[in-house]
Image (cartoon, rainbow, N blue to C red):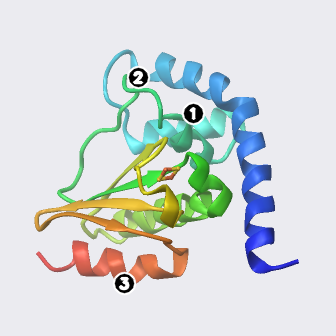
Amino acid sequence: MTGLDATILEGIEQASEFVAVAAQIREALREKCCGQPLSYQDVESVAEALGLSTTLVHASMATEPDLTLVITSDVRFTICVGECTLHGSFKNLQALLEHRKTRVEEGKMPFDIETRGCLDRCLFRPSMLIRSPDGYATKLRLKPEELPELITSLCDSW
Ligand code: FES
């Protein structure tokens, strides 16, 4: 089995798990938010209450415009969790969430994370859109190991 096959199989597994619980997650998020933007802690508490990963809960917000997160930073990473899931986007999302949490614990400037169903860069999956004071950029065929340098260069240079 090639590395790509393994990534796709893992992605199918994650996507299947996601589809099975997405509606339940969205209902819990709507109850929690009462029409207001959610905090990252709100998302964590919903994940904990449902016994699911925070990654899945963030992914479930991708296609729901009424479910938004509070803005905490000038730097935002938008992760595609559509078909990019089959090419490793859940791993990227999970890694981003972990890096953000660590930065907050260390008192460093956080960054924001949002999920979308497609970023129109489907030929170069998994893709991510970056917004910073410098403008917009797209990171194509993103790998989790590329994130630390990217985050440092965007968040620690102001
Ligand atoms: S499916 Fe991910 S960019 Fe289109």
Q: Which mark is residue 111?
A: none
At label 3, the amino acid type is Glu
Dot placed on the residue nearer the N-terminal end, 3 or 2: 2
Residue 41 in the image: above or below residue 121: above
Binning the other alpha carbons within 10 Å of mark 2 as few (below 14), some (14 to 19) or many (20 upward) gives some
Q: Regarding mark 3 in the picture, which secondary structure is present there?
A: helix
Mark 1 falls on what kind of element? Answer: helix
Quick one: 151 or 16, which is closer to the camera? 16
Q: Is residue 62 above or below residue 14?
A: above
Mark 3 — residue? Answer: 149
**Amino acid identity at mark 1:** Val
In x, y percent, where is residue 67? 40, 27
Residue 9 image position (x, y, % from top left): 81, 60
Where residue 70 appears, x then y in whole percent? 28, 39
Q: Earlier in the sequence, mark 1 or mark 3?
A: 1
Residues at marks 3 and 2 touching, judged by CB atoms closer than 8 Å: no
The residue labelled by disc 2 is: 33
Dot label at residue 46: 1
In this view, the residue in front, 128 or 18, is: 128
- Residue type beneath disc 2: Cys
Asked if residue 150 is positioned above or below residue 91 in the image, the reply reads: below
User: Could you tell me which residue is drawn at 65 percent across and 47 percent down?
Assistant: 53
Can you say which quadrant of the picture contains the N terminus? bottom right
Q: Find the distance from the CA under tag 2 to the CA under tag 1.
A: 10 Å
CB atoms of marks 2 and 1 within 8 Å = no
Q: CA distance from mark 1 to mark 3?
A: 30 Å
Which structural element holds mark 2? Answer: helix
First in residue order: circle 2 vs circle 1: 2
At x 44%, y 43%, the residue is 116
Q: Residue at x 69, y 39 (%)?
A: 18
